[in-house]
Amino acid sequence: MAKQVVKLKKQQAHKTTLKFGSFERRRTIEGWTFSIPWIVGFIWFMLIPLFLSVRTSFFITKLTDPYGFGGESTFVGFDNYIDVIKDPAVGEVVFNSFLQSLYKVPIVVAFALFVAVLLKQDFPGRTVFRVIFFIPVILAGVIMAYLFSDSIGSISVFSGMLSSGGMGFLSEIMDVSIISQIGTIMWSSSVEILIFLAALQSVPIILYEVVELDGATAWESFWHVTLPYISPFVILNAIYALVDSFVDVSNPVMGILEEMTSAGTKYGMASALSWMYMLATLLVILIFVLLTRRWLR
């Protein structure tokens, strides 16, 4: 009897509840309410600019008709891409960009790992130092671009110290171009440091206790326990550093793109160069992932 009463009450409650007011329907509406602003922003700020950029790369544009919709710009097909390929100056700049990333990325990743290992140790003021290394992420990109433009924020004190006095022998061992960029490398490794910190804290303490019982030193524990355990994060940081170096303000490709756009008549060629550069960057990242995928196992 009691079960029948409960069943009748449920049926009455179901009849009195509007269809659009059901729990599942309300959850669906809530989900779309939170998703629609992101979808609109993604379409407006990502898909539409990407489409316009691709379209511009097929035109010789004018300032009055930058996207070729007004009929004033000239459709040239793949001529802009061919001009980019034929231009030896552009090829040299792109090659220098990849060459710069070839030595900068390993240094940034190694420095970030070194700093993360230090910040993981228990010492007074550890939280303050962690905040200091995260400051570059907090500051806006425009501010950083201004600080590092025209050597305003370039930290060249290291190269000056190494090239003077009794430390001159270090300048003979190390590349001067690398030494002069120590400050920039320190500034651009903040995100990698935080990722490595999270990775180091995820290593089970019991592993260190086991190798310590076997008589392993701290150096041996790092190479045989820490580094193999966090190897996926090393690859992740390397990819992040690659992307960051390719779009960095000091990247020579960014400089040549700025020169093309500042002229006001080479928007199509600049768009073609940017898309070719992006595809080359994706190819480099794909090759890197294929070469290091065994570390992820």
Image (cartoon, rainbow, N blue to C red):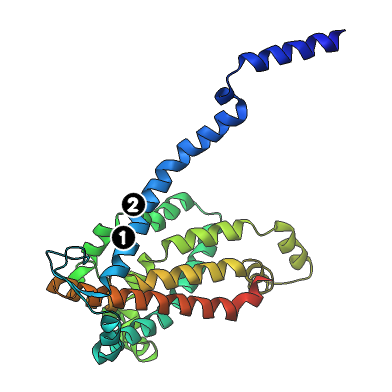
* Circle nearer the N terminus (1, 2): 2
State the residue at coordinates (25%, 64%): 145
Task: Evaluate whether residue 177 shows in this view.
Answer: yes
Foreground: 97 or 47?
47
Residue 239 lies, in percent from the top left, at 49, 71
Label 2, on which residue? Answer: 44
Q: Quadrant of the C terminus?
A: bottom right
- Residue 211 location in percent, x, y? 75, 68
Report the side of 152 relative to 125 (left or right): left
Pick out the residue farthest to the front. 71
* Residue 251 in view, yes or no: no
- Residue type beneath disc 1: Pro
Residue at 54% from the left image edge and 64% from the top image edge: 117
Check if mark 1's residue and mark 2's residue have beta carbons within 8 Å: no
Q: Is residue 293 above or below residue 236?
A: below
Q: Quadrant of residue 179?
A: bottom left
Task: Say whether residue 54 is left or right of residue 133.
Answer: left
Residue of label 1: 49
Q: Residues within 10 Å of mark 2 (few under 14, many from 20)?
A: few
Element carrying mark 2: helix
- 27 versus 40 height, above or below: above
**Quadrant of residue 87 in the image?**
bottom left
- Residue 174 versus residue 146: which sits nearer the camera? 146
In which quadrant of the rendered image does the N terminus lie? top right
Relative to 2, say whether 246 is above or below.
below
Q: Secondary structure at mark 1?
A: helix
Count residues near mark 1 (Cα–Cα under 10 Å), then give few for <14, some for 14-19, many for 20+: few
165 shown above or below 241:
below
- Give x and y (percent) for residue 259: 18, 75
In whole angstroms, how far apart are the C-alphas of marks 1 and 2? 7 Å
Which mark, residue 199? none
